[in-house]
Image (cartoon, grey):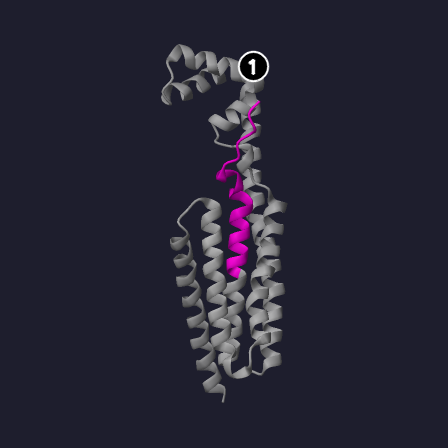
Amino acid sequence: MREKERHRTQRIGWLRAAVLGANDGIVSTASLLIGVAAANAGRQEILIAGLAGLVAGAMSMAAGEYVSVYSQADTENADIEIEKRELAADEEGERMELAGIYIRRGLEPRLAREVAAQLMAHDALGAHARDELGIIEQQQARPVQAALSSAVSFAAGAALPLSITVASPASMMIAATAAGSLICLAVLGALAAQAGGANIWKGSVRVLFWGAAAMAATAAVGKLFGTSVS
């Protein structure tokens, strides 16, 4: 027996949540730290803001991802229930519908009907879920997994700029946080692209552009309000 092949599409669920969480953790926390620092706040205030952003962001990511993915799971389950009722009411019609799908994909009508009959004899609901609804087991919505991946990855991402800020002298805090965060973003983009089988340079450039834009925007806001307050 051949070993079961593993494909990159099997990583889509957790990879999307992990990359989104880590990227958001770095960008939002670094931007928050830079914005507060640019407003001439003290080190203690800056670090408290960063820590609060880490906790709030991790919880927000977990809640948002859970609700979003759970909605997807609800939709999938509702469609599967419809298929159950249709199979119970008209099994022959569902067999012909499945055969029609295979004909459109290129099978000869006779072979398509035979394939549909054999697949439905083995697992009728599974065949319709996969080939009619496009619901594949490896890509099914998993709300808890997505929520945990998002929360943990956000916290890990947010910890990077926060650590850089802690270790930086006051005179270099903004520059060090920005530079270190951009390096982390470039590495994250490259690793995510490699895991997904994409070009690592394009992956790095994408996250660098948006990360730099977010930090520049919050620095400008912090500088504006810091100047007006003083």
The residue identified by callout 1 is: 121
User: Of residues 65 and 90, which is closer to you in this image?
Assistant: 65
Our reading of the magenta stretch's main secondary structure is: helix
Residue 31 rendering spot, x and y as whole percentages: 49, 70
Residue 79 showing in the rendered view: yes
Count of marks, rendered view: 1
The answer to whether 33 is drawn above or below residue 111 in the figure is below
Task: Work out which residue is located at the far bottom of the displayed protein and give it.
Answer: 230
Amino acid under label 1? Ala
Residue 75 appears left or right of 213: right
Residue 223's place in the image compared with 216, above or below, is below
Q: Quadrant of residue 54?
A: bottom right
Q: Position of residue 219 (x, y in %)?
A: 45, 75
Residue 226 in magenta stretch:
no
User: Residue 18 colored magenta?
Assistant: yes
Residue at 62% in and 80% down: 44
- Report x, y in % for residue 153: 58, 56
- Residue segment shown in magenta: 1-24
Work out which quarter of the rendered image holds the N terminus and state it: top right
